[in-house]
Image (tube, coloured by chain):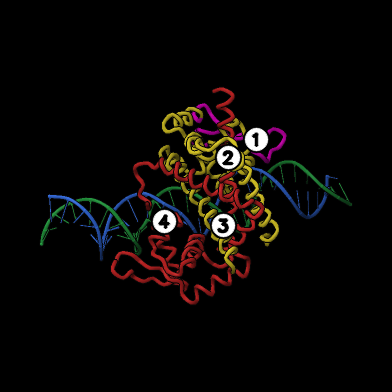
Chain colours: A yellow, B red, C green, D blue
DNA sequence: TTATAATAGTTCCAAAATGAACGGTTCATA
DNA sequence: TATGAACCGTTCATTTTGGAACTATTATAA
């Protein structure tokens, strides 16, 4: 392994670690907010996604949140029992479920945001020092990296039955 | 909320999502590699860190891996029982533990890498399309974002620091 | 010195997360 | 339509996780 390769590997390691580092912080903040409001992390995640569009299928929430569907199902169940969310069959497709924020859910979520700004505001503050162009490039690089990693999995890692 | 603010929030949301997206892929790859080799994710993570320097305190591994110390302790315990790692008190400080890769551990890890390249190589491939300057900027932006997020540590940071 | 606080790691166990199997629904093809 | 595959969500059982309390050691203060 020559010098150049060694440098490449080191840069790669640092970059990987930096992803972990940012992510650890995001997860920690999300967890704090969730716990303070008697929600689990998946539950708060779901609320964040659903509140955005007021109505959304469970399937779409799964795609956006990357939660395994059993986790998703149970988390939704809890939210419904808390009265924060309502389940409703999609008209014309009895397989899918629409998730709708209830009155109570909306109030609940708004209160969370008043308390501590919520993850979106905190994150927004954290990226504020970056220029608009930097933010755009960051997004593009992430999307590309995600795509590349995804490609590997479907190519090599599909020993699923 | 005016147009500009709305755009800012949207960009922020996308960026946050892109972090989740990359991270989900990294975690899934790590998980696949770990499971294929009868290790848990924390265990594989620990091996990756320790192999790098052959010898390292448990404390340092905690700082680098971001694992809660109870998780870390149990994972290390498993690795020791598998004979892949050895515990050794730090000379001059009986509180700290040195973690040392055993012969068997080194072989084990090398085999993993031969099988599928390991996460480092895969990740390296995923960032290959980026220019060197882009990679540097990406790293810098991540470090900055992590630092900014770190500032929002709630008073009760009973993990490690 | 002694007392108190901080640190590293372990243990315990309740809570959280999730893989696998399943039930009902829709789609594709004949 | 019939059949089989694919899909969406749920349930169940099991594993994983991580907070809190604990032991042992070291650091700091009085």
Residue highlighted by disc 1 = A89
Place residue A92 in its image quadrant: top right
Is residue B135 shown in magenta? no
Q: Which residues make up the magenta segment? A: A79-105
Q: Residues within 10 Å of mark 2 (few under 14, many from 20)?
A: some
Residue highlighted by disc 2 = A134
Q: Residue at x 54, y 54 (%)?
A: A16
Label whose residue precedes the other's in the sequence (1 or 3): 3
Q: Residues within 10 Å of mark 1 (few under 14, many from 20)?
A: few
Q: Evaluate whether residue B82 shows in this view.
A: no
Do the numbered discs 1 and 2 sit on residues whose CB atoms are within 8 Å? Answer: no
Place residue A98 in its image quadrant: top right
| Chain bearing mark 4 | B
Question: How far separated are the C-alphas under marks 1 and 2?
Answer: 42 Å
| Chain bearing mark 3 | A
Q: Is residue A43 above or below residue A152?
A: above
Residue highlighted by disc 3 = A12
């Amino acid at each position: 392994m020559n010098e150049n390769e060694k440098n490449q590997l080191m840069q790669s390691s640092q970059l990987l670690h930096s992803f972990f580092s940012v992510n650890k912080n995001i997860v920690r903040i999300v967890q704090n907010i969730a716990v303070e409001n008697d929600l689990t992390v998946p539950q708060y995640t779901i609320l964040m996604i659903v509140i955005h569009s007021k109505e959304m299928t469970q399937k779409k929430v799964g795609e956006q949140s990357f939660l395994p569907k059993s986790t998703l199902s149970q988390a939704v169940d809890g939210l419904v029992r808390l009265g924060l969310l309502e389940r409703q069959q999609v008209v014309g497709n009895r397989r899918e479920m629409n998730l709708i924020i209830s009155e109570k859910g909306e109030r609940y979520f708004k209160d969370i945001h008043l308390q501590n700004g919520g993850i979106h505001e905190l994150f927004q503050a954290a990226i504020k020092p970056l220029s608009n162009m930097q933010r755009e490039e960051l997004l593009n690089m992430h999307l590309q990296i995600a795509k590349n990693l995804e490609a590997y999995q479907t190519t090599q890692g599909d020993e699923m039955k």
